[in-house]
Amino acid sequence: MFLLSINVRPDTKHLSRVLLSGSADEVRRLACPVTGGRLKIQYYEKDGWRSVSASGVDSEFRTVLDGLQRRPAWLDEIQCPFETQP
């Protein structure tokens, strides 16, 4: 797996952990590390390549987790793209 995050912030570790292995409820409650507001979550899968991204709805924050080995389990309950409700 390859992780790329521009403007790495300590609070993105929690965000990344939840996006990779959190429950659907944890993902729904994620907040933008910059504003504390909503995030737009997107998931991509093509030809075995998986990626999830989180972007601040009201900020320029963005992080991408690229090259995921498996589809996150929370996708069984949440359809992407969607906005979180922190």
Image: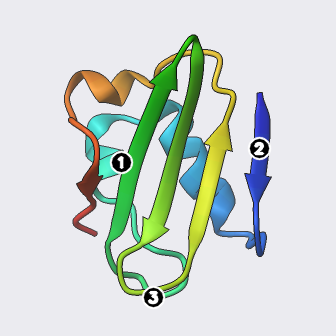
Identified at 56% across, 35% down, the residue is 51
Give coordinates of residue 59: x percent, y percent: 47, 86
Q: In this rendering, which labeled residue sits more in front, label 2 or label 1? A: 2
Disc 1 crowd rating (10 Å Cα; few below 14, some 14-19, many 20+) is many
Give coordinates of residue 62: x percent, y percent: 57, 67
Identified at 76% across, 68% down, the residue is 6
Residue position for label 2: 3
Disc 3 crowd rating (10 Å Cα; few below 14, some 14-19, many 20+) is some
Residue position for label 3: 35
For residue 63, side relative to residue 55 (left or right)? right
Identified at 47% across, 19% down, the residue is 71
The CA distance from mark 1 to mark 3 is 17 Å
Q: Nearer the viewer, residue 65 or 49?
A: 49
Residue position for label 1: 27
The CA distance from mark 2 to mark 1 is 18 Å
Q: Quadrant of the N terminus?
A: top right
Q: In this rendering, which labeled residue sits more in front, label 3 or label 2? A: 2
* Disc number for residue 2: none
Q: Nearer the viewer, residue 30 or 79?
A: 79
Amino acid of disc 3: Thr
For residue 86, side relative to residue 32 (left or right)? left
User: Which is more N-terminal, label 3 or label 1?
Assistant: 1
Identified at 21% across, 36% down, the residue is 79
The CA distance from mark 3 to mark 2 is 22 Å
